[in-house]
Image (cartoon, rainbow, N blue to C red):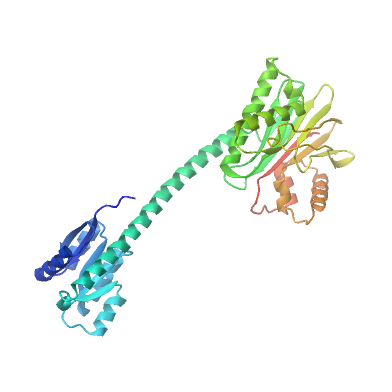
């Protein structure tokens, strides 16, 4: 860091003392310094109102101790060196130190103690330089934080715009609602619903590894890949989107191609209104979604590898015949982090019981029921997505 020329405010009513100080400092090996003189406390206060000084050298007497204290307050956290007249008593010296002076010298002995006086000035200038550096670093940090907050707010806005409507119709009669609770400003959890035509609707819940901006960036890529699969289907160039397994493999390949070192867990589902079936595949996602019907609630079967870790991952595709009325409830694994139960099995049993007892398609109401009405600070992102036909 480059350092500007430092400055000293020299306050003394005697021009002879001022000249003496100039002479001592002129002979000393000081860093580049500019000295401003003041012959009264009012002049000194005016000078301090106009600029900042690295060091103040000021005369002090028992009668002017309050003015010295004011000067110290205006100069804080930079040092003030006090000059005492004549043979000042220990009591006067102590009084100046109590008022905040960093060091004290007697005017009458300045010539004989010139080396010590100059050494003290050099040390205080160095201390002031450290204060300046600290303030400069703090200002830079505050500016960087302001820029970061602005960037984060913009990124959050973009991520929010990428999400589907919080309450929407995936297909005629099938509604979708979701809730995202990020652990940081940005979320690594992401949900999407892509209606392909009047027959098909693809949806997914993804949980990107890690937290914050880097994970949120992957959700942008994920959104883009899903949209591309949908466009390919609509123009007839590719039908991978009709196979959840093929969808996972495409995302796995493209995520590896980016070289970001990120992976994700993902549940991909496809509604087919013509066959009344739910086709789905699992990419390392846990807990599994709960399917709720008139007969009760149970976890879907299935397993698979995480997405973005392996060149040749294995994903199983499943199909479930849908009844006239059903609810499909998906969670990201962040929900497991905040449940009070000790074991994973107990947490899963609790999830199923609450989902069945509440019978709600409102994810916010379900989250409050699961967590006792109060959402604690989440160590991981929490996503809840409910698709239902009543």
**Residue visible at 60% across and 31% down?**
258
Give the total number of marks visible in the rendering: 0
In the figure, is residue 280 to the left or right of 107? Answer: right
Residue furthest to the top in view is 236
Rendered location of residue 287, percent (x, y): 77, 43
Rendered location of residue 34, percent (x, y): 19, 57
Relative to residue 339, is residue 39 depicted above or below?
Answer: below
Residue furthest to the left in view is 16
In the figure, is residue 146 to the left or right of 353? Answer: left
Question: For residue 252, which quarter of the picture?
Answer: top right
**Residue visible at 62% across and 35% down?**
219
Residue 173 visible: no
Q: Quadrant of the C terminus?
A: top right
Residue 73 visible: yes
Rendered location of residue 321, percent (x, y): 87, 29
Question: For residue 285, which quarter of the picture?
Answer: top right
**Viewer-side residue, 217 vs 66:** 217
**Residue visible at 21% across and 69% down?**
58
Rendered location of residue 182, percent (x, y): 62, 45
Residue furthest to the right in view is 295
**Viewer-side residue, 101 vs 178:** 101
Relative to residue 116, is residue 268 depicted above or below?
Answer: above
């Amino acid at each position: 860091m480059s350092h500007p020329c430092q400055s000293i405010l020299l306050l003394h009513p005697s021009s002879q003392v001022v000249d003496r100080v100039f002479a001592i400092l002129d002979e000393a090996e000081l860093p580049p310094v500019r000295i401003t003189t003041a012959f009264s406390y009012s002049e000194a206060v005016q000078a301090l109102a106009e600029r900042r000084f690295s060091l103040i050298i000021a005369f002090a007497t028992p009668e002017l101790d309050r003015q010295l204290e004011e000067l110290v307050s205006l100069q804080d956290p930079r040092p003030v060196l006090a000059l005492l007249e004549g043979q000042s008593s220990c009591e006067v010296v102590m009084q100046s130190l109590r008022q905040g002076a960093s060091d004290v010298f007697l005017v009458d002995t300045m010539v004989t103690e010139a080396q010590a006086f100059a050494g003290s000035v050099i040390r205080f200038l160095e201390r002031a330089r450290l204060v300046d550096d600290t303030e400069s670093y703090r200002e830079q940090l505050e500016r960087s934080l302001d820029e970061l907050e602005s960037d984060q707010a913009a990124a959050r806005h973009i991520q929010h715009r990428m999400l589907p409507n919080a309450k929407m119709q995936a297909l005629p009669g099938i509604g979708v609602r979701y809730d995202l609770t990020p652990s940081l400003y940005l979320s690594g959890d992401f949900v999407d619903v892509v209606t392909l035509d009047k027959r098909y609707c693809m949806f997914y819940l993804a949980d990107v590894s890690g937290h914050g901006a880097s994970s949120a960036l992957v959700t942008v890529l994920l959104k883009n890949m899903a949209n591309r699969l949908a466009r390919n289907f609509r123009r007839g160039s590719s039908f991978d989107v009709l196979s959840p397994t093929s969808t996972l493999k495409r995302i796995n390949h493209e995520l590896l191609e980016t070289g970001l070192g990120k992976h994700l867990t993902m549940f991909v589902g496809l509604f087919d209104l013509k066959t009344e079936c739910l086709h789905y595949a699992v990419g390392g996602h846990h807990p599994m979604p709960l399917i709720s019907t008139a007969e009760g609630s149970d976890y879907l079967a299935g397993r698979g590898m995480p997405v973005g870790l392996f060149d040749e991952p294995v994903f199983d595709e499943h199909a479930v015949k849908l009844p006239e009325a059903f609810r499909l409830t998906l969670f990201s694994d962040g929900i497991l982090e905040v449940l009070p139960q000790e074991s994973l099995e107990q947490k899963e049993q609790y999830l199923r019981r609450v989902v069945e007892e509440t019978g709600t398609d409102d994810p916010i109401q379900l989250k409050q029921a699961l967590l006792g009405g109060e959402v604690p600070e989440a160590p991981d992102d929490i996503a809840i997505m409910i698709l239902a036909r009543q």
